[in-house]
Image (cartoon, rainbow, N blue to C red):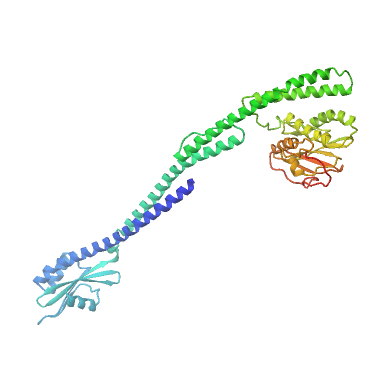
Amino acid sequence: MRWALVKVCVAVTTMVVVAFAVPLGLVIKEMARDRAFSNAEREAAAVAPALSITTDRDQLERVVASAGLDDGIAVHIPAGEGAKAVDIGRQRAADKDIGTTRTLGRASTTEVPGGSTLLQPTALSSGVAVVEVFVPESEVSNGVGTAWAVLAAVGVALIIGSVAVADRLGIRMVQPAQRLVGAAHELGEGKLGSRVPEEGPAELRLAAVAFNSMADQVVQLLANERELAADLSHRLRTPLTVLRLNAASLGDGPAAEQTRAAVAQLEREVDTIIRTAREAKPQTAAKGVGAGCDAAEVVRERMDFWSALAEDEGRKVRMAGVDRPVRIPVARADLVAALDALLGNVFRHTPEGTAFAVDVHNGEDAVIVLVSDAGPGIIDPEAAMARGRGSGSDGSTGLGLDIVRRLAEATGGDVRIGSSVLGGTEVRLWIQLDGRAPVRRGHRGTAVRRRRRGAGVR
């Protein structure tokens, strides 16, 4: 908008300058010509009194010489009774033009090499004498070039001034718009304290007022949602307490220990939800190496947890790629939630005895986590990736895969569902290490495929 305003001002100012400068330049040129011929008429008039007194050649030559006009003036006296024609000075005009002036009896101008001549008739007793005054071209255009240069300089100065004024006006309008755009980006990035100064033109001030009001409303809505989440989570404490007491009375044994560990973890998760929801400021995604975690360590830890349940159900478990540290820019709690969602789906949507595997591939710019199973597969992968679009036949909501998807997209990666080498479903979690868009490498399972074998949405 700023440069558009500058262009408009340049175009308008240029048209105004041309509209005034061109006619003014032509007027100046005409005035210079009139001035030159007015001087020529005065010179011719200086010789006329002498012609009315005498027509003697010597006396007329002395008159012309005394006036300093001997180089640019000529006098043509016609022959009279007993007298010859007299021509004084250098004749530049043609005899025809001189004769025409005598016949018409009025002054005229004619073009000659190097300039123009003024032919001024003067009545004598013997006829009509013609005074010829030479007007050089340099005298006709004297001062015209300078005047045109001044006009051009003034026009350029006006154009530059209009550009400066338009630029200032453009900045006055553009800066509030830029601040509004920047605040919108900051609000989109989660900086809820971003506000816009209510400055600039009336329209932009109204836009700033509306934006600030919207931001305040967003903050209030988020605060209400956090309070609601905290309240709902807090209601789980009572049944959790009963569940913990019942688990404590189960006695000893692997199943009892596993139940108590699950209840303790559930209590910790509920406490974390309540503390996070009660915080005044929203949590921003952690970035950087120092804020990440070791994916291999997290996978080993969660597989140890799920392996006990897999052993009870007769499932074969396999891990790969977790023998060395794999740093990713993801918070540990987020990765734990994503893995639990994927492994929980395996136990929830495949029959007992179905094998599953977790593979970790560490690349230069990305880390890939593959969760594969030998189950019946997913009938509608697209519906499985859509939050809240579960079929409802098995109580699924589709929130598990949505948690995984949001984790991947927060790093610039993505999630794909395909066929696994075990014969069932493979969920590929692509975690980008540098925040760029994921680079497709033709990995198996990157395309979403619809399977013919029936299963519910996860």
The residue most toward the right is: 314
Q: Image quadrant of residue 391?
A: top right
Res 201 visible? no
Residue 352 position (above or below residue 63): above
Residue at (85, 24) in percent of width and height: 258
Place of residue 172 in the rendered image (x, y in percent of width and height, measured from the top left): 45, 40
Residue 176 position (above or below residue 10): above
Place of residue 405 in the rendered image (x, y in percent of width and height, measured from the top left): 72, 38
Q: Image quadrant of residue 144?
A: bottom left
The residue most toward the front is: 393
Marks counted in the figure total 0
Place of residue 20 in the rendered image (x, y in percent of width and height, measured from the top left): 34, 56
Place of residue 432 in the rendered image (x, y in percent of width and height, measured from the top left): 72, 39
Res 206 visible? yes
Front residue of 360 and 57: 360
Question: In the image, 220: left or right of 319?
Answer: left
Q: Image quadrant of residue 404?
A: top right
Question: In the image, 200: left or right of 415?
Answer: left
Q: Quadrant of the C terminus?
A: top right
